[in-house]
Amino acid sequence: MRCVVANWKMNLASEEARSFCEDLLAHFTPSAGTEVGIAPPFTLLHLVSGLMRPKGIMVFGQNGHAEAKGAFTGEVSMPQLRDAGCSGVILGHSERRQFFGETDAALAKKIKAAWQWDLLPLLCIGETLDQRDAGQTLQVLGQQLSILAETGPGPLWVAYEPVWAIGTGRRAEAEQVREAHAFIRAELNRHFAGSEYQVPILYGGSVTPESFPELLGIPEVAGGLVGGASLDPKKFAQLVKQAS
Ligand code: PEP
């Protein structure tokens, strides 16, 4: 199975989102082996899920709180994401780790909460440039995946997103992607040993229609989590076609 997910981050207002969806649908043909998802900001979830879910496109939250409800001003819970039409939730994006203090301990709770509310977690992991330069990449990825020892197995997608490649226009080299994805697969096999769950591993970090075909040819790359290029419906439709 191939997976292509658009992370809109904190971009677009309702009319822009509506015209994106119309444009994407004009250029998009669903294909059996490819899951397509869009992760809009919270304010656009109802609108986007109303337009996209009937066409078989998944909608993801960009974050979700581990508690179902309560005094957590500014947060959105997993049941609220479900209620807004989501079938998945991005967790642990590097911008959340970097700017909002997201910890591995909190992420383990969020994954369990997502499962409780029947949402598919898309867990993002990746090293910073300092960590790569210090030769710590695989150690960092192993640490970030170690929360799966606590959650146990379940439905999951993982995105390998080297932090230094996100929004920078600097895509990781094929060999770096190959090594990271092979390591992630081995760790997933260890944590989910004996379970029925197949976990696709997406690559994220400055994916464009120019770079995506090469990435898709790397073993264990099941698709892409796309930021910048996903704001252009024609480019995003092209990425979906390349994956299909
Ligand atoms: C992302 O936000 O997950 C991402 C990969 O962004 P970009 O494609 O802009 O690097």
Image (cartoon, rainbow, N blue to C red):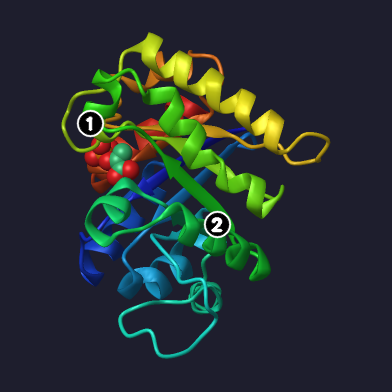
Numbered label tally? 2
For image coordinates 51% across by 32% down, the residue present is 142
**Residue indicated by mark 2:** 108
Q: 232 or 61: which is nearer to us?
A: 61
Residue type pointed to by label 1: Trp
Locate residue 121, reporting x and y percent. Answer: 55, 54
**Mark 1: few/some/many CA within 10 Å (<14, 14-19, 20+):** many
169 displayed left or right of 197: left
Q: Quadrant of residue 204?
A: top left
Q: Residue furthest top?
A: 175
Query: What is the secondary structure assignment of the residue under circle 1?
Result: helix
Locate residue 92, reporting x and y percent. Answer: 41, 51
Q: Quadrant of residue 48?
A: bottom left
* Label 1 close to label 2 by CB (< 8 Å): no
Q: 50 or 78: which is nearer to us?
A: 78
211 displayed left or right of 193: left
Q: 21 or 71: which is nearer to us?
A: 71
Locate residue 64, reporting x and y percent. Answer: 45, 68
Q: Quadrant of ligand 1?
A: top left
**Residue indicated by mark 1:** 164
